[in-house]
Image (cartoon, rainbow, N blue to C red):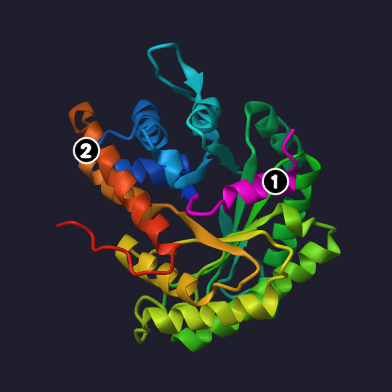
């Protein structure tokens, strides 16, 4: 049987990344509706099936993160329906599950957020393990404008509690402390908040006896706010590597960056620049993107079976572009 450390290494395997398809029912329904697709349970299932089943996806994708609804749904196949986790495994992709229940306002924190979902998590993880989950994800949200030592510390504490429970239940935790890129801050401010956040997270992981060899870190790239002064890919790479070197122990097997609202072309430029200067880094540096990989495919599909092949080709192209960025060279431009 594969150990947790071996599973973590598989998730960050050279040349592959993690596909995030874990939007909540509400968020996914909104995205379907925005494309003129009826936001029904069946259409959510059809869309997730589009993402899991492209031939050759496992060449660039090592794992796929699902939500609770999808974890229990079935992929329609000629040889019979199978649940999504098994379908992913049969395609050479590890299935994962989002286990947090979203964010809410943190008391007395002047607009900062706290992620919820710890209540009953041990039992839910045990069930997800039975359903076939190899890994899980929990997202903590740190807003640059409202970040304080208090808000960072309580989110780090919750991330570590989640990670410990995952490992107890035989599931690899993806530890996701996201410093949001929303806002008008510059790259130096993002670097400062990202520094404080990762320092707090690893202090809590150590305190709560989490095995670092059996986690995957999913942080933000260090970028300016989307409305802030621009930074070049080289500046983003330099700032990101500085933060990692100061805070991430070498025992962590891999770091899978989130896209954080950046489009595919932009985030792949950042990732390529980072891999171009991080050849001697102790961790494998890869991607765990959601919208940056899937939004184009959703638009092409439009809910129509006739568009399925083209939509899957679009997804594969975006995944290939992200995988190419892991080589540290500028990815080819997106086709018109």
SS label for mark 1: helix
Q: Is residue 67 left or right of residue 79?
A: right
Identity of the residue drawn at 56% across and 38% down: 94
Residue 38 in the image: above or below residue 114: above
- Identify the mark at residue 6; answer none if there is no mark: 1
User: What separation in Å lies between label 1 and label 2 (alpha carbons)?
Assistant: 35 Å
Q: Residue furthest left?
A: 336
- Is residue 111 visible to us here? yes
Q: Earlier in the sequence, mark 1 or mark 2?
A: 1
- Identify the mark at residue 310; answer none if there is no mark: 2
Percent across and percent down for residue 243 are 60, 79
| Magenta-highlighted residues | 1-17
Residue 166 in the image: above or below residue 335: above
Residue 149 in the image: above or below residue 172: below
Identity of the residue drawn at 80% across and 56% down: 210
Identity of the residue drawn at 85% across and 65% down: 207
């Amino acid at each position: 049987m594969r150990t947790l450390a071996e599973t973590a290494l598989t998730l960050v395997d050279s040349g592959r990344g993690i596909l995030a398809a874990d939007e909540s029912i509400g968020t996914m329904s909104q995205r379907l509706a925005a494309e003129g697709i009826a936001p029904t349970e069946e259409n959510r299932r059809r869309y997730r099936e589009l993402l899991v089943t492209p031939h050759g996806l496992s060449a660039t994708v090592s794992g796929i993160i699902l939500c609770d609804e999808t974890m229990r749904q079935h992929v329609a196949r000629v040889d019979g329906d199978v649940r999504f986790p098994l379908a992913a495994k049969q395609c050479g992709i590890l299935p994962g599950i989002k286990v947090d229940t979203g964010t809410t306002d943190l008391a007395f924190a002047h607009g900062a957020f706290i992620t919820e979902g710890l209540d009953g998590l041990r039992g839910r993880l045990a069930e997800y393990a039975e359903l076939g989950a190899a890994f899980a994800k929990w997202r903590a949200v740190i807003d640059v404008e409202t970040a304080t030592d208090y808000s960072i510390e309580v989110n780090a504490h919750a991330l570590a509690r989640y990670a410990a429970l995952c490992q107890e239940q035989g599931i690899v935790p993806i530890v996701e402390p996201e410093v949001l890129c929303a806002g008008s801050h510059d790259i130096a401010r993002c670097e400062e908040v990202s520094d404080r956040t990762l320092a707090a997270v690893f202090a809590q992981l150590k305190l709560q006896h989490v095995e670092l060899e059996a986690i995957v870190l999913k942080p933000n790239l260090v970028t300016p706010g989307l409305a802030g002064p621009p930074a070049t890919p080289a500046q983003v790479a330099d700032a990101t590597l500085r933060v990692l070197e100061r805070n991430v122990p070498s025992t962590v097997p891999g770091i899978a960056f989130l896209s954080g609202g950046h489009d595919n072309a932009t985030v792949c430029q950042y990732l390529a620049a980072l891999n171009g200067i991080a050849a001697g880094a102790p961790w494998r540096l890869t991607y765990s993107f959601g919208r940056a990989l899937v939004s184009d495919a959703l638009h092409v599909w439009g809910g129509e079976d006739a568009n399925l092949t083209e939509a899957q080709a679009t997804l594969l192209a975006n995944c290939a572009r992200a995988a190419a960025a892991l080589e540290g060279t500028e990815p080819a431009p997106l086709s018109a």
